């Protein structure tokens, strides 16, 4: 393979950037006892559940909470702009904080899965995020179009 292969250099530079080299393990580590691997599996399941809850909270509880906070700011200050701005900034801030936490939990999950004896190279964050988005988006569309109804502009009443 050439020295400037994009998979070897990180894709952007001819030389290697610091910290982007392929992982080289010294050797296969000694496997833990059966009890230790069972405990690691249980911990990995717990971390995966925490990661899932973090991702699911992005699509319901966090936006609803910040809309409530924004409505309280609007009521207290009598300023719609202040309420909307508070809700928007708060949603963005908690989105970034939640994703940063989820990324750290995902990294810990990968390490624990490896300790449990699995060849875990990728995390589950991308899959969990996309699946939670699809479920929450489908639930919203079902609520919007089926339960509440489109409204008189789309479906006029007689």
Image (cartoon, rainbow, N blue to C red):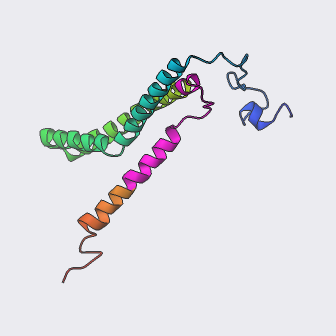
Q: Is residue 130 visible?
A: yes
Q: Nearer the viewer, residue 123 or 89?
A: 123
Left or right of 75: which side holds 102?
A: right
- Residue shown at the point (75%, 26%) measured from the top left: 16
Judge whether residue 119 is colored magenta.
yes
Q: Check the picture and name the quadrant holding the N terminus.
A: top right
Judge whether residue 139 is colored magenta.
no
Relative to 120, residue 143 above or below: below
Label count reads: 0
Relative to 146, residue 85 above or below: above
Q: Nearer the viewer, residue 93 or 83?
A: 93
- Residue shown at the point (73%, 16%) measured from the top left: 26
Left or right of 79: which side holds 134?
A: right
Q: Position of residue 38 (x, y in %)?
A: 49, 24
- The residue lying furthest to the right in this view is 2
Q: Position of residue 65 (x, y in %)?
A: 25, 40
Q: Position of residue 125 (x, y in %)?
A: 50, 37
Left or right of 158: which side holds 51?
A: right
Identify the main secondary structure in magenta: helix
Q: Is residue 82 visible?
A: no
Q: Which residues are magenta?
A: 112-137
Q: Quadrant of residue 82?
A: top left
Q: Position of residue 96 (x, y in %)?
A: 42, 34
Q: Check the picture and name the quadrant holding the C terminus.
A: bottom left
- Residue shown at the point (66%, 17%) measured from the top left: 29
């Amino acid at each position: 393979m050439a020295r400037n292969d994009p998979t070897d250099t990180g894709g952007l530079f001819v030389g290697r950037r610091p910290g982007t080299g392929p992982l080289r393990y010294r050797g296969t580590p000694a496997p833990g006892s059966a009890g230790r691997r069972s405990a690691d599996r249980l911990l990995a399941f717990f971390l995966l559940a925490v990661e899932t809850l973090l991702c699911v909270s992005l699509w319901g509880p966090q936006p609803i909470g910040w809309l409530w906070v924004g409505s309280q700011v609007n009521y207290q200050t009598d300023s719609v702009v202040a309420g909307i701005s508070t809700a928007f900034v708060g949603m963005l801030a908690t989105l970034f904080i939640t994703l940063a936490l989820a990324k750290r939990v995902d990294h810990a999950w990968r390490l624990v899965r490896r300790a449990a004896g699995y060849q875990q190279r990728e995390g589950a964050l991308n899959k969990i995020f996309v699946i939670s988005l699809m479920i929450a988006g489908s639930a919203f569309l079902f609520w919007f179009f089926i339960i509440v109804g489109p409204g008189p502009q789309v479906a006029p009443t007689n």
